[in-house]
Amino acid sequence: MPRSHAMLTVVAEGRTWLADVGFGGEGLVEPMPFEQGAGLRPPAVTVHPPRARPADHRGRSGAAGGLSFATAGELAGWLRAELGIELTEPDARALLPMLPA
């Protein structure tokens, strides 16, 4: 994915979703649950959240069994490793408080 790509989290009906903002090209076709064990199968790509340690090992509990990140570096690393999204640590630091605790 290009470095200018953007994703956002959306909380709806008590669940957190990872959504592609739709710049075009490759990306998520539909929102993906931002939860342990969830995954989507777009036309040519399979995307799964990581096999994360339990939330209590990350320092924050996840909402509705969702993923949680103790640091901005951990969030940036997950986005890079699992979704191929490059996010600077300052940008990840700005995003971190927006995730449900």
Image (tube, rainbow, N blue to C red):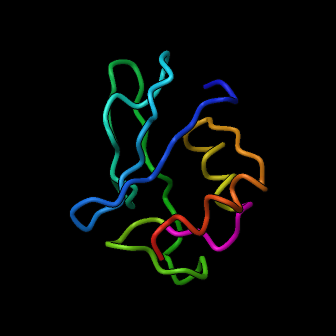
* Residue 9 position in % (x across, y down): 44, 53
Tell me if residue 30 comes above or below residue 25 in the rendering: below
Is 72 included in the stretch rendered in magenta?
A: yes
| Quadrant of the frame with the N terminus | top right
* Residue 70 position in % (x across, y down): 64, 74
Q: Residue furthest left?
A: 13
| Res 96 quadrant in image | bottom right
Magenta part, dominant SS: loop
Residue in view at x 35 percent, y 71 percent: 65
Q: Nearer the viewer, residue 101 or 45?
A: 101
* Residue 45 position in % (x across, y down): 42, 25
Residue in view at x 63 percent, y 37 percent: 85
* Residue 72 position in % (x across, y down): 71, 63
- Position of 91 with respect to 81 (left or right) is right
Q: Which residues are magenta?
A: 68-73
Q: Nearer the viewer, residue 40 or 95?
A: 95
Residue in view at x 38 percent, y 73 percent: 63
